[in-house]
Image (tube, rainbow, N blue to C red):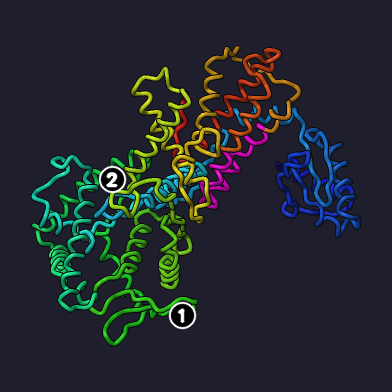
């Protein structure tokens, strides 16, 4: 809207003999209850107009209406000048901008961003929390890519440590050589099964030792199973060939299982990091910090940083025995990532229970004077809850991702069949549609909410074809495609001279797509795209119900409405793809 900015600058100069720059003008979207599309805030101009904000707005409005052919009308409400652009302007906007191939296509901006998400442990399957993490990380990466960034999708896999050894030990003791093939289970579920077995047997040992008179703390420490797991970890760190072989075998099972879940969720990665390769990297940074005086050593040999002056506390960065703690590894991995990719921004998609950890991590790297530390960002998100009794989890504690996907497909099938929408589909097409609708429902429900907010996920509510849901938007897209498939076009763009209110409102909304992408990229918030696409679907349905397309009063109106429909479908499809959601051609 640069021509409006230029017109306001010109108006102020002409009427009040005052020079201002376009940066001093506050342009806003006109509120829905008022006529117009663009609003100029006139309060700042009263200091040189020496008139009230309403009269100032009227002066500027009259000048602009006379000077700018695209402006058809204006109104002033208090200190707000609401400008209406002509139908000719919006018709031209549709044909020469929105309907073109390069609409909302951003040029590369020469900035590189890494988005790290998923970060699973290899001792259990992915769960509901991982689902929000994966969908959020993938969508943010896609939005940044659309906004012109060079994006690297990364996954840091937690594949080492005592929790991994617990699954390994339980399999050694109780597995009898069981494999995913022999058990007929996904590999991640099989390994998770043995993690649960370890926990059950360990608790039995704790209760036995407590009955013998030991305290709970003593029992946890001296239970034979935990001691065996610790020995296994020591052997792993020492490179024991048998232990390493078992570790590799069981991790292979897990990665195969994860791969199937990632495919079902529709997420992918460009780069995998493994903690087994990175857990020692931070030790050099500890030495660097000691040399710079950023860290200090205590009498027992442990190394710390004092962050009390920054409102935090003292933080251990290396134990007295020389071993790493979790933040040591994160310091090293952050350096490795930057050395490999030299990105301008590095986004960590991690739940809000780790807020403090990332404050400390980023502050340490700043104090170490890492030039890239200012580009680190923690995309913190809230927990996902389920209505009690809605879904049974495998172990009764957390909801398994594969169970959730199956539940969503089943819910989509039930709702779709009740509506009688798939009677003429082949069995294969039906299954594909149920997956598309189920995943669309799940993804949209989780992504439409600001990432920082905790949310309650209701599978049934998410598949409502009439609500603020993914399936409602998917159905709108299929409806448009159905209209276009039944239409005959003469291949020529026929521009009308006037617009109905619903046509104009839809074009105005479509025109905002580029700024929506830019805003969502800047805020790392897919919810901005999700809610925008819903508004498009709502606006299209209003237009569809108010105006016949195939039975339009004349050929000109028909061709124009077909063009408007095709453009709406394109924006809906592209917007949903940024959320990782497929839109079917028919439903």
Q: In the rendered image of this protein, does residue 3 appear above or below residue 346?
A: above
Q: In the picture provided, is 369 more to the left or to the right than 325?
A: right
Q: At which x and y percent is residue 492?
A: 62, 15
Q: Which residues are magenta?
A: 506-533
Q: Quadrant of residue 555?
A: top right
Q: In the rendered image of this protein, does residue 162 appear above or below residue 89?
A: below
Residue of label 2: 258
Residue shown at 47%/50% (left/top)?
456
Query: Observer-nearest residue: 506 or 227?
Result: 227
Q: Work out how far the residue at label 2 is from the one at label 1, CA to CA, in angstroms.
A: 41 Å
Q: Are marks 2 and 1 in contact (CB under 8 Å)?
A: no
Q: Split into 4 quadrants, where in the image is the N terminus? A: top right
Q: At which x and y percent is residue 82?
A: 79, 43
Q: In the rendered image of this protein, does residue 325 appear above or below residue 472?
A: below
Nearer mark to the viewer, of 2 and 1: 2
Residue of label 1: 308
Q: At which x and y percent is residue 270?
A: 34, 45
Dot placed on the residue nearer the N-terminal end, 2 or 1: 2
Residue 309 among magenta residues: no
Residue shown at 66%/27% (left/top)?
543
């Amino acid at each position: 809207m640069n021509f409006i900015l230029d017109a306001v600058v010109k108006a102020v100069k002409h009427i009040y003999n005052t020079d201002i720059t376009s940066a001093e003008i506050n342009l806003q979207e006109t509120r829905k209850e008022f006529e117009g599309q663009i609003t100029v805030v006139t309060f700042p101009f009263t200091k040189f107009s020496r008139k009230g904000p309403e009269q100032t707005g009227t002066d500027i409005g009259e000048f602009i209406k006379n000077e700018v052919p695209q402006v058809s009308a204006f109104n002033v409400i208090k200190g707000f000048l609401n400008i209406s652009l002509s139908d000719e302007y919006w018709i031209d906007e549709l044909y020469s901008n929105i309907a073109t191939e390069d609409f909302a296509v951003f040029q590369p901006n020469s900035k590189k961003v890494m988005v790290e998400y998923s970060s699973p442990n290899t001792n259990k399957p992915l769960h509901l929390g991982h689902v929000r993490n994966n969908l959020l990380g993938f969508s943010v990466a896609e939005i940044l890519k659309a906004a012109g960034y060079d994006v690297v999708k990364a996954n840091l896999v937690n594949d080492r440590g005592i929790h991994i050894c617990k699954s390994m030990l339980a399999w050694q003791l109780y597995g009898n050589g069981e494999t995913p093939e022999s058990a007929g289970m996904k590999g991640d579920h099989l390994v998770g099964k043995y993690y649960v077995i370890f926990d059950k047997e360990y608790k039995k040992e704790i209760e036995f030792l407590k009955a013998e008179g030991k305290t709970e703390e003593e029992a946890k420490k001296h239970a034979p199973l935990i001691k065996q797991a610790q020995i296994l970890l020591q052997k792993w760190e020492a490179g024991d060939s048998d232990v390493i072989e078992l570790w590799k075998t069981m991790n292979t099972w897990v990665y195969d299982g994860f791969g199937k879940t990632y495919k079902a969720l529709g997420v992918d990665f460009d780069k995998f990091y493994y903690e087994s390769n990175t857990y020692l990297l931070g030790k050099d940074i500890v030495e660097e910090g000691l040399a710079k005086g950023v860290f200090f050593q205590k009498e027992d040999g442990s190394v710390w940083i004092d962050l009390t002056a920054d409102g935090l506390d003292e933080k251990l960065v290396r134990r007295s025995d020389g071993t790493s703690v979790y933040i040591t590894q994160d310091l090293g991995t952050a350096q490795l990532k930057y050395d490999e990719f030299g990105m301008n921004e590095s986004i960590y998609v991690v739940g809000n229970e780790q807020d403090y950890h990332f404050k400390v991590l980023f502050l340490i790297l700043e104090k170490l004077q890492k030039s890239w530390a200012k580009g680190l960002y923690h995309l913190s998100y809230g927990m996902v809850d389920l209505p009690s009794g809605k879904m049974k989890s495998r172990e009764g504690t957390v909801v398994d991702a594969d169970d959730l996907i199956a539940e969503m497909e089943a819910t989509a099938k039930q709702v779709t069949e009740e509506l009688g929408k798939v009677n003429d589909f082949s069995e294969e097409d039906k299954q594909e549609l149920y997956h598309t609708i189920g995943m669309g429902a799940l993804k949209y429900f989780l992504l439409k909410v600001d990432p920082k907010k905790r949310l309650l996920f209701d599978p049934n509510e998410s598949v409502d074809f009439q609500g603020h849901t993914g399936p409602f938007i998917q159905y709108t897209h299929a409806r448009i495609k159905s209209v276009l498939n039944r239409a005959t076009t003469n291949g020529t763009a026929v521009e009308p001279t006037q617009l109905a209110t619903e046509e104009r409102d839809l074009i105005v909304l479509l025109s905002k797509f580029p700024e929506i992408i830019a805003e969502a990229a800047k805020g790392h918030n897919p919810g901005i795209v999700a809610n925008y696409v819903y508004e498009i679907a709502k606006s299209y349905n209003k237009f569809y119900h108010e105006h016949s397309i195939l039975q339009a009063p004349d050929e000109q109106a028909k061709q124009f409405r077909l063009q408007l429909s095709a453009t709406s479908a394109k924006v809906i499809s592209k917007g949903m793809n940024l959320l990782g959601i497929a839109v079917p051609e028919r439903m």
